[in-house]
Amino acid sequence: MPAPIRLILIAACAPIAIFALAGAIGAGAPTPAAASGIVQPARPPIHWSPDALRVLTAEIEASRHLGLDPDDYGIAALRDEMQGGPAAAGIDHLATAAALHFALDLTAGGPATPGRPSPPSAHEPAARAALQVQLALADTTGTLRAWFGRLRSAGQAG
């Protein structure tokens, strides 16, 4: 095979091999979010600023009045990671997973229970991916509190 074609094939296959290898390496030990049963993000985690982390934890804590339990979203683990500062290992992954789980419950009007299952759309990868894109946009634009408020309103109306 000519060298230019070989290079093109290597360049085309390298990202696939890297993602496969990363998945195999990461499959050994569960992350704190995976161990707690929190919805896992479909995309790489968002980089969370200290302000965004404060908004997220405040929103999760404030959800008690909606009948939600902040422990369902890993609030204790999130607070523990925050003690290590915004550069703490795992904070971005944990915060993204907690925010997505929280967003899904807000959208559904609350967590799934035996008497009230979550809507089928909440289990679709496309719905979770769309929520993660919206979450990233809200984080980037500094509108997390307003975004969670819109989800809360939509869930209560539905």
Image: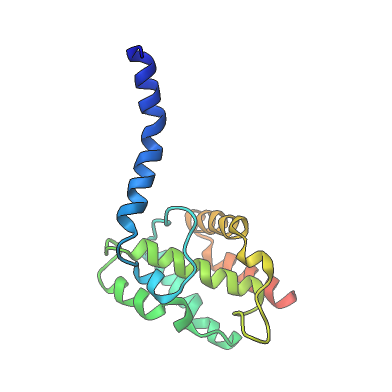
Q: State the image coordinates of residue 122 (x, y, percent, origin top left).
A: 63, 67
Rendered image quadrant of residue 131 = bottom right
Q: State the image coordinates of residue 55 (x, y, percent, origin top left).
A: 46, 70
Residue at the extreme left? 84
Q: What residue do we see at 53% from left, 54% from top?
A: 137
Q: What residue do we see at 52% from left, 64% from top?
A: 144
Image colouring: rainbow
Q: What residue do we see at 35% from left, 11% from top?
A: 2
Rendered image quadrant of residue 11 = top left
Q: In which quarter of the image is the C terminus?
A: bottom right
Number of numbered tags placed on the structure image: 0
Q: Quadrant of the N terminus?
A: top left
Relative side of 114 to 2, left or right: right
Closer to the camera in the image, 83 or 128:
128
> Where 147 falls versus 80 (above or below)?
above
Closer to the camera in the image, 117 or 155:
117
> Where 87 falls versus 61 (above or below)?
above
Residue at the extreme right? 158
Rendered image quadrant of residue 18 = top left
Q: State the image coordinates of residue 136 (x, y, percent, origin top left).
A: 50, 55
Residue at the extreme front? 1
Closer to the camera in the image, 83 or 8:
8
Q: State the image coordinates of residue 104 (x, y, percent, origin top left).
A: 59, 69
